[in-house]
Amino acid sequence: MKSISFFLMAACCFLFTLGSCTDDDDSHAEATVSFMGMLTDLEFSIPSETDETDAGSTVPQSEVEKEADTDKLNYGEMISAVFEKLELIGPSSLITESAKITGSSSSLGLAQLQCVQQMQKKVQAKIDAVSLSGIKDLLFSLYEEQFETANILSANDIPVESITPEFTYIGSSVDGGFVFKPTFK
């Protein structure tokens, strides 16, 4: 599965690099730059379910089973799939921006910078539209069967307290990546 995802990402990067067009002369500069998001880091917190009663007491068997079932869930993969569904990463996150700079100080670099700024505004607007409760709702709808097996019966019961992803947007015709690192609480 990971090799298929890697192949798709590499193919998309190659295609949007081919689709990049630039034009530069003395009076104007034009640039079209495509960007695609990748999840380069992911941190999330799940509270531990430790028993805070007397040291001599035992946790009921049903609680032990529940904790064991919860540990079987792969939250990292699940959250990554949610971000792909929200079009923040993967092929569906592809953003193409165009800019034209006119005047004596126009340059290809300025046109590309304007494309970067336009992309950053669009990505930030997508991120601002996301909330932890929205992520949990989508998690539950995508993985309802797995959650029910782990005795998590609603999105509100998902024990994730915060999520901090690192999205890196790579652009054709521009150097480096552009990082967004929001925290959803």
Image (cartoon, helix red, strand yellow):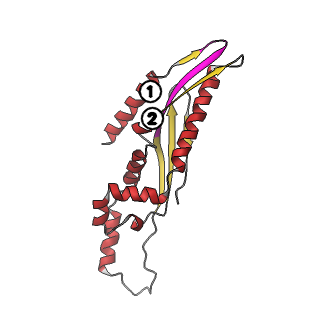
Q: State which region is magenta.
A: 24-37
Residue 137, compared with residue 178, is above or below; it is below
**What secondary structure do most residues of the magenta stretch adopt?**
strand
**Element marked by disc 2:** loop
Q: Is residue 160 left or right of residue 72?
A: right
The spot of residue 153 in percent (x, y) is 33, 68
In this view, the residue in front, 128 or 5, is 128
The spot of residue 150 in percent (x, y) is 31, 66
> For the point 55% across and 32% down, which residue is it?
176
Which residue position is annotated with label 1? 16
State how far apart marks 2 and 1 are (Cα).
Answer: 9 Å
> For the point 47% across and 51% down, which residue is it?
42
Query: In the image, what residue type sits under mark 1?
Result: Phe
Query: In the image, what residue type sits under mark 2?
Result: Leu
Label 2 or label 1, whichever comes before in sequence order:
1
Quadrant location, the N terminus: top left
Pointer 2 with pointer 1, Cβ within 8 A? yes
The spot of residue 27 in percent (x, y) is 67, 13
Q: Residues within 10 Å of mark 1 (few under 14, many from 20)?
A: some
Residue 46, compared with residue 125, is above or below; it is below
